[in-house]
Image: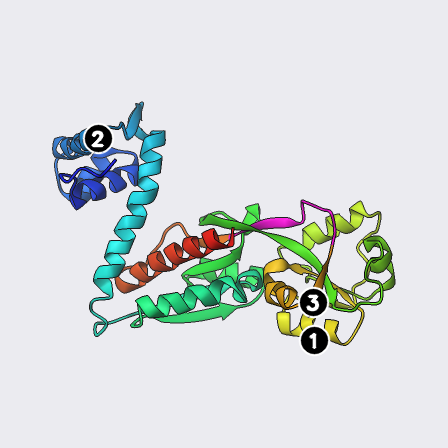
Amino acid sequence: MIMHPAIKLRHIRVFLAIAAEGNLSAVARAQGVTQPALSRSLAELEDLLAAPLFRREKRRLILTEQGALFRHHAAAAVQALETAAAVLHPEGPGGRIRVGILPTAATRLFPVIALRFRQIAPQVTLAVETGPHSHLVRLLRDGAIDLMIGRMPAARDMAGLRFEHLYEDPIALVSRAGHPLAGQPVAQALAACPLILPPGDAIIRRAVDEYLLVLNRATPQPAFETVALAVGRGILAGSDALWFISRGVVADELQRGTLVEWPTGAAFLSGAVGLTWRQSGGQAGPEKTGLDLIRRLAQEEAAHMA
């Protein structure tokens, strides 16, 4: 079905505002229009789409299945239009977006996003902060970064934050190619080789500890603790160590064959990777447009990785 030519951008904006608030009177006050006028715009859109977008529950408007589907695509379309309008004026103030990148997204996902972002919005500077998960969550809460890309924070850290899932990233057990115990049972290799584990405050450490318990091994004293690619790769190259690390960190090395993955057989060694930001927002102008663009690019790249 082709979209009805009578649907205007104002219809879409009204719909998105109502979907966000769930209340006609709140949107009417915010937009300085009467509630009957807002109701007419919504009714026009539903007639033109030939689909109910909301159902009433007490005093709130709840999206129908059709409404939720339409919202997903309509929001992306409006973001794209806003980005297109903004990039027509690169001479204007571009702003600066502060992004926190966790290791699992640092080697593959984010570089692609960053390069595509630069092509579309060259007037905006991307300031990249890296570090442990707890450090980046603290920066996000303090307003020192605008967005975090990586593994989903623990439930205890999610108050006041929003998370958008992109894809699942397994925790891999890896070693250098040509490891002398290649082909041996994992439990035997873990008992015989030095181990590199994620630091105790890393978001993936708990899953690794649980896996070791499944093998009837209390968490051993690791030889090293790191999630840094350069450090772990260098140690593996010069030793027979085994490293538990998010596969996204070492994906390129695995593809090139310089590192190899050992089969763990543990489906629970996986976790959600996505975007985390403050619910309160606070960005405006080019910064908000830039954040919307990063989110769209991340969604597109994650779809290619699936």
Q: Secondary structure at mark 1?
A: helix
Which amino acid, mark 1?
A: Gly
The CA span between labels 2 and 1 is 60 Å
Q: Colour scheme of this structure image? A: rainbow
- Residue 275 visible in this rendered orientation of the protein: no
70 versus 128 height, above or below: above
Give x and y (percent) for residue 2. Answer: 23, 38
Closer to the N terminus: mark 3 or mark 2? 2
Q: Disc 1 designates what residue?
A: 234
In this view, the mark in front (3 or 1): 3
The question of residue 161 being in magenta is answered with: no
Q: Residue at x 78, y 67 (%)?
A: 241
94 versus 204 height, above or below: below
Closer to the N terminus: mark 3 or mark 1? 1
Query: For mark 2, does the 10 Å Cα neighbourhood hold few (<14), some (14 to 19), or many (20 or more) residues?
Result: some
Image: magenta residue range: 263-273
Q: Residue 259 — which label? A: 3
The question of residue 266 being in magenta is answered with: yes
Q: Disc 2 designates what residue?
A: 46
Please indicate whether residue 157 sits to the left or right of residue 143 in the image: right
Considering the whole magenta stretch, tell me its main secondary structure. loop
Give x and y (percent) for residue 63. Answer: 33, 32
